[in-house]
Image (cartoon, rainbow, N blue to C red):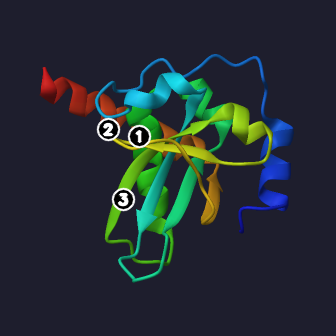
Amino acid sequence: MGNNGTFLDVAVDHYTKDVHGMQNIPDTGFDEASKGNFNFIGMINYTGIQGDDGDLFILNPEISQKLNDFNICHEILYQLAKLREKVYVSWQEVLIDSDYYQEEQLMILQRHCSPRIWKGETIICSPNAKLIQYAVQRENELREKRK
């Protein structure tokens, strides 16, 4: 889907303004997050093809807010990107500003960069319960290993 029209209309209809910002966002690299309301999770996947801006995967804002964990949300997006019939050679995590999202624009924040409006392909992801459970379990296992 493109970044105009239908995808935002559907997603914005389900977005609730009263949700709280994401609590568990890593500090490293998202220095300018305080300059906006960056509380949705996204991931840009790159094909490596010259001239291709990549695809921006966004976790459904309600799910992003409900899970409230950057690493779990990112794992879900990573797994969903692997299911797409497109070969990606790299990816980068981003945060999405919910204020712009409601205005049907996508202001993204990449690590160590300034915020910018996204103009490329956008895919809003709504994972099923099984994938969410997998991501939670995987992240819990990784956290245990880090201890």
Give the distance between the C-alpha atoms of the residues marked 3 and 2, in whole angstroms: 19 Å
Foreground: disc 1 or disc 3: 3
Q: Up-down: is 92 above or below 21? A: below
Residue 51 in the image: x percent, y percent? 46, 81
Residue 68 visible, this orientation: no
Residue nearest the observer in this picture, 96 or 137:
96
The residue singled out by tag 1 in the image is 135
User: What is the secondary structure assignment of the residue under circle 1?
Assistant: helix
Residue 104 in the image: x percent, y percent? 78, 47
The residue type indicated by label 2 comes to Arg
Residue furthest to the bottom in view is 50
Give the distance between the C-alpha atoms of the residues marked 2 and 1, in whole angstroms: 5 Å
Give the distance between the C-alpha atoms of the residues marked 1 and 3, in whole angstroms: 18 Å
Residue at horizontal 49 percent and vertical 70 percent from the top: 53
The residue singled out by tag 2 in the image is 138
Going from N to C along the chain, the mark reached first, 3 or 2, is 3
Q: Which quadrant, please, contains the C terminus?
A: top left
